[in-house]
Amino acid sequence: MNPDQLATLHLRCFGAHPRPWSAAEFEDLLQSPLNFLLARPQGFLLGRAVADEAELLTLAVAPEARRQGLASRLLGDFAAASRARGAEQAFLEVAADNAGAIALYAGQGWEVAGRRRNYYAPGLDAILMRCALPAKTNG
């Protein structure tokens, strides 16, 4: 997916809540060697890995492709890509009113680690979530 496609899908997924990212913002993010894009038809995840921590920057799945396991597959890919980059734990922020996303993350082993008041807008907090990324073991 190119930056225009990413921005179009991000807008379809999030509308104006919170503010969708522009093609220029995606282009800038993709320039950093710390950031990585995991794209599949109908969805994508943008992550960042620095030292032993990874951050899930955004996850978008087309509305018509939801509830088919794509987000879970992208989260699995994110964990593997983050571990390959040396991350031992990962973080994300999710809008406090996005119950579906919070349930998805919790179901994948993410735990609430904090709250950022008014992060997205006045009255719209972010839930900070954390997930351990243990190294895969054989056996």
Image (tube, helix red, strand yellow):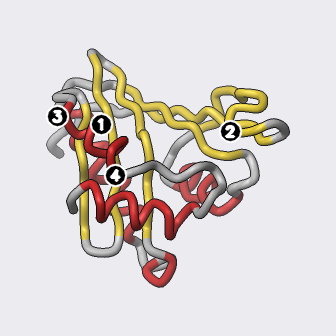
Quadrant of the image containing the N terminus = bottom left
Of tags 1 and 4, the one toward the viewer is 4
Q: Left or right: 95 with respect to 132?
A: right
How far apart are labels 4 and 2 at the CA level? Answer: 20 Å
Residue 45, horizontal then vertical, whole percent: 35, 52
Q: Determine whether label 4 and label 3 are within 8 Å by CB.
A: no
Of tags 4 and 2, the one toward the viewer is 4
Which label number is shown at residue 29? Answer: 1
Of callouts 2 and 3, the N-terminal one = 3
Q: Determine whether label 3 and label 1 are within 8 Å by CB.
A: no
* Residue displayed at 71% across by 58% down: 99
Residue 4, horizontal then vertical, whole percent: 29, 60
Which residue type does callout 4 highlight? Ala
Q: Secondary structure at mark 3?
A: helix
Of callouts 1 and 4, the N-terminal one = 4
Question: Is 37 situated above or below 15?
Answer: above
Q: Secondary structure at mark 4?
A: helix
Pointer 2: what residue?
Answer: 120
Residue extending farthest front? 24
Residue 33, horizontal then vertical, whole percent: 16, 29
* Residue displayed at 31% across by 32% down: 48
Pointer 3: what residue?
Answer: 84
Q: Left or right: 81 with respect to 58?
A: left
How far apart are labels 2 and 3 at the CA level? Answer: 31 Å
Q: Residues within 10 Å of mark 4 (few under 14, many from 20)?
A: some
Pointer 4: what residue?
Answer: 23
How far apart are labels 3 and 1 at the CA level? Answer: 20 Å
Which residue type does callout 2 highlight? Tyr
Which residue type does callout 3 highlight? Ala
Q: Secondary structure at mark 2?
A: strand
Which residue type does callout 1 highlight? Leu
